[in-house]
Amino acid sequence: MKKISVLTLMAVVAVCLTSCVSSKKIIYFQGADSIYAQAQQIQQKYEMKLKPADQVLIKVTCDNPELLEIFCSDVIMGSSGTRSGSIGNYASGSMTNAYGYTVDNNGDLILPVIGKVQVQHLTCDEAALVIEEAIKKQNIIKEPEVTVRLLNARVTVLGAVKAPKVVTLTSERNTVLDVLSQCGDVSDQALRKNVTLFREEDGIRTMYHMDLTQADIFENPAFYVQQNDLVYVQPNKSQNVKSSAFSTFLSSAASIVGFITSITALIISLTKK
């Protein structure tokens, strides 16, 4: 009987070493019941700010199609891009021209006739207002309507996620949870307490740490992602152990010990009868 007890203990220990995971390591947003017992005001600003190398779509609209002729030719000058298309509605007397442009290293857009327009650190809506004012100063169009939208906003997700990839952002309000869900969520081997986000701003790279298991992640300055962010989900150290030769041996040994224990117990039980 002593031998059976020892073998059983060995089996239990082996199984615990290979498979036990604390629920505190995998449950998201712990502490939310107390933190959000009352509604909390959202503090972070989620609008993305324009940066060098950003590609933007600029649409100019007015009631007089003839005034938009200066925007109707493909012009490649400095940071300007190629024409992405024009939409005309002459029956109603309105016309819209859409062009793709790239923000240069100085944070400027170079537009036909208008010239340089500084847009770095501005949101798309703020940049649209600045371009409208620049058009008015040139006396080209009295009441232009300008729309600016990011074309190449994306976030790279690597590490312990089910489908690592480059995620294209479809709006300006995107959280780290949004991009992780686009990758199928973190994998079973992910260290949810250590998600790292790298961000480049004004030539400086900053690293942020996030803990998916804690409810205060919503207050993290990197909770809302920006274009060109890099998200890395660290794998759990136990995954390295799990995939090692020792772990494979331990797991196999646990199965063998368990099998032997069951057979021995059965034989002794039959012998007693």
Image: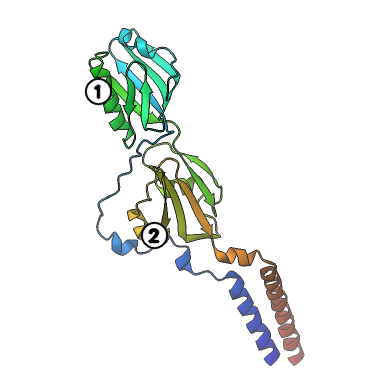
Sequence-first disc among 2 and 1: 2
Q: Position of residue 209 (x, y in %)?
A: 42, 57
The picture places residue 183, in percent across and down from the top left corner, at: 52, 47
| Kind of residue at disc 2 | Phe
In the rendered image, residue 38, in percent from the top left (x then y), is placed at 24, 58
Q: Answer whether residue 92 is visible to the viewer in this image.
A: no
Please identify, in this view, whether the residue under mark 2 or under mark 1 is nearer the observer.
1
Give the labeled residue for mark 2: 29
- Residue drawn where x is 39% and y is 60% of the image: 29
Residue at 26% of width from left, 54% of height from top? 40
Q: Which residue is mark 1?
A: 133
Q: Is residue 193 above or below residue 163?
A: below
Q: Is residue 62 left or right of residue 217?
A: left
Which quadrant does the C terminus fall into? bottom right
Q: CA distance from mark 2 to mark 1?
A: 45 Å
What element does badge 1 sit on?
A: helix
